[in-house]
Image (tube, rainbow, N blue to C red):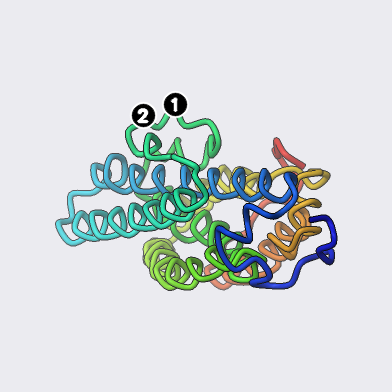
């Protein structure tokens, strides 16, 4: 079955039966992509429920942490079901401790120490996740593209909540200085979420229609979208190459 066009068009592979007839490279790429995503959603749920919840004394904010954690876990369950349909069992992921999850092992989701950083997690990191899930909406594998629409609706709310936290903080000069310090630390780590620009796997994703953009292009688009929003708040993101681990 090597006669498929490259890249595949959205929804070319309509379900598990067609998936099993695809070349091994396509199947391996899709499984890896979904494992990373599904583990990341479980970690997102833990971030809200186990970390952010304890960073605030505000009952309303605690309630929202619970709500957003539930949405992240629902996204995780969606990924579990997509993988289960192609005989890949990742039911163990939700039971792992955060430090034992290695597929989505990044500083920006495992080192949030203040409520300001929690705000940037929503404003910046959830927006980076949105940019990557946005690619799922154009996936050549139909179950993934169908899953993406619901997740993106939730993620818009997560991003808006984080933006509100940072916007309110920036109403005072003291708060703006605190936000700027957190931004300076978190901006490089957020850009690193997109992976290495020269990743062969990201090129293969594009070739097989599992994504439209390679890592570097997706990162550049994200930065161009996000910088103006930060600047309107009087904040300045570091140079895109400063303190980066995955360039």
Front residue of 168 and 157 = 157
Residue at the spot 53% in from the left edge and 35% down from the top edge: 105
Q: Is residue 100 visible?
A: yes
- Check residue 100 in the rendering and tell me which mark sits there, or answer none: 1
Instruction: Count residues near mark 1 (Cα–Cα under 10 Å), then give few for <14, some for 14-19, many for 20+.
Output: few
Instruction: Label 2, secondary structure: give it.
Output: loop
> Position of 217 compared to 153: left or right?
right
Q: Looking at the rendering, in which quadrant would you find the N terminus? A: bottom right
Residue at position x 18%, y 62% in the image: 60
Above or below residue 94? Residue 19 is below
Marks 2,1: beta carbons within 8 A: yes
Task: Give me the C-alpha separation between circle 2 and circle 1.
Answer: 5 Å
Q: Which residue is mark 2?
A: 97
User: Relative to residue 200, is residue 149 drawn left or right?
Assistant: left
Q: Is residue 160 above or below residue 120?
A: below
Q: Residue at x 64, y 71 (%)?
A: 138
Q: Quadrant of the C terminus?
A: top right
Q: Is residue 174 at least partly visible in the picture?
A: no
- Residue 229 placed where, x, y %? 57, 71
Q: For this rendering, which residue is in front, 55 or 220?
A: 220
Which corner quadrant of the image does residue 171 belong to? bottom left
| Residue 50 position in % (x across, y down) | 28, 40
Q: Is residue 184 left or right of residue 246?
A: left
């Amino acid at each position: 079955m090597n006669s498929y066009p490259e890249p595949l068009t959205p929804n070319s592979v309509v379900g598990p039966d067609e998936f099993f007839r695809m070349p091994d490279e396509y199947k391996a790429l899709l499984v890896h992509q979904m494992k990373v995503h599904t583990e990341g959603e479980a970690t997102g749920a833990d971030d809200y429920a186990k970390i952010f919840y304890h960073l605030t004394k505000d009952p309303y904010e605690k309630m929202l942490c619970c709500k957003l954690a539930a949405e992240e876990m629902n996204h995780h369950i969606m990924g579990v079901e997509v993988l289960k349909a192609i005989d890949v069992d990742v039911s163990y992921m939700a039971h792992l401790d955060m430090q034992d999850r290695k597929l989505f092992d990044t500083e920006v989701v495992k080192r949030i120490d203040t409520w300001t950083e929690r705000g940037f997690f929503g404003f910046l990191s959830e927006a980076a996740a949105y940019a990557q899930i946005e690619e799922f909406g154009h996936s050549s594998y139909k179950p993934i593209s169908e899953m993406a629409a619901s997740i993106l609706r939730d993620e818009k709310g997560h991003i808006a909540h984080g933006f509100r936290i940072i916007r309110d903080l920036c109403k005072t000069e003291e708060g703006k200085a605190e936000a700027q310090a957190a931004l300076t630390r978190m901006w490089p780590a957020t850009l690193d979420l997109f992976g290495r620009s020269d990743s062969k796997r990201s090129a293969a994703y594009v070739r097989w229609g599992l994504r439209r953009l390679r890592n570097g292009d997706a990162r550049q688009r994200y930065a161009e979208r996000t910088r103006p929003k930060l600047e309107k708040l009087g904040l300045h993101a570091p140079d895109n190459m400063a303190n980066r681990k995955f360039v």
